[in-house]
Image (tube, rainbow, N blue to C red):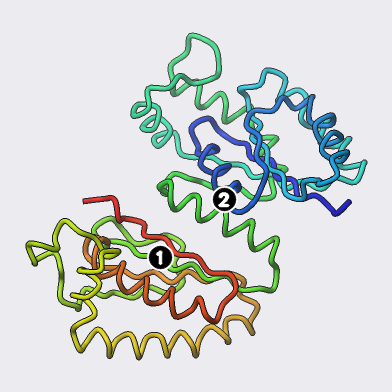
Amino acid sequence: MKQQKIIIVTGLSGSGKSTAIKALEDVGFFCVDNLPVVLLPNFLQLRRKQSSGLEKLALVMDIREEGFLSGYANVLDGLTKQGYQFKVFFLEASDEELLRRYSQTRRHHPLAGGESLLERIRAEREQLQGLKGIADKVIDTSLYNVHELKHIVSRYVLKEIHAGEIEVHVLSFGFKYGLPHDADLVIDVRFLPNPYFVRELRELDGTSQLVEAFVKKWAETGLFLDKYLDLLDFLIPFYEKEGKSYLTIAVGCTGGRHRSIVVANEIFRFLKEKIKRINLTHRDIELT
């Protein structure tokens, strides 16, 4: 059997574990949410008996399961001695951010008791300190939206799996919603004519052929793309030579719905012919 890659996603309630597990599922992991930790050895043994096997496995485990805190250390230690290798992702967020998220979702905190929500959050944080201490990756999700968190998780995992092989992420965004936190290269295309001010284009987005045609018809658009794509063609081999495994190219306009999408699509099409591992995200396309 090939060596399994097993990731345990854990951390504070409300910190984004569901988002993280979805990101892992998107990059090919078989994912299980809330598996009781005492069942993990039997589950792994069952998977090994299957002829097809599962090389990439991710599990969410946390205090929703009553015996998790008292049992995880012995179970993981025993499985490690059997040759299994684990990566533990620990997600957390500030008290203020967790309170905001609970207020928005109206979910109940899994810790029992009559204390206030803030006291439960702090109690859980204290109980999970030992687990946080053994984590391979700690992610504070306070400043990340759903798309950014999925990107960060998949970025870290793919870096582990494809060491030595660069992956490029092309990202469009709107400056009005903030800079992407993990961008390596940021290009501002607000100098291009804006389709927003054309009445019949305003409600469309950059995936529309009409918007694309409008943005690309200007001489400055073609000149800019020629120069910027030539620059990327020059830079990326040097990033690879220096061992950089992940490169995020962020393209921004005012709202992230027109010009940045058109330009990001062009960059993606250009690099897709040259780079094996590349993906594209339009972060703010659904926002107004």
Q: Which label sits on residue 171?
A: 1
Q: Nearer the viewer, residue 30 or 117?
A: 30
Q: Position of residue 180 (x, y in %)?
A: 39, 61
Q: Nearer the viewer, residue 121 or 88?
A: 88
Dot 1, crowdedness within 10 Å: few (<14), some or many (≥20)? many
Q: Nearer the viewer, residue 267 or 191?
A: 267
Relative side of 223 to 244, left or right = left
Q: Which residue is mark 2?
A: 26
* Mark 2 or mark 1, whichever is nearer to me: 2
Relative side of 241 to 214, left or right = right
Q: Is residue 74 visible?
A: no
**Above or below for 112 versus 123:** above
Q: Nearer the viewer, residue 147 or 117?
A: 147
**C-alpha distance separating marks 2 and 1:** 17 Å
**Above or below for 277 versus 221:** above
Q: Earlier in the sequence, mark 2 or mark 1?
A: 2
Q: Secondary structure at mark 2?
A: helix
Q: Residue at x 60, y 46 (%)?
A: 25
Q: Position of residue 225 (x, y in %)?
A: 33, 85
Q: Is residue 242 visible?
A: yes
Looking at the rendered structure, the kind of residue marked 2 is Asp
The mark total stands at 2
Q: Residue at x 30, y 71 (%)?
A: 262
Check the image and name the residue furthest to the right: 82
**Above or below for 265 versus 38:** below
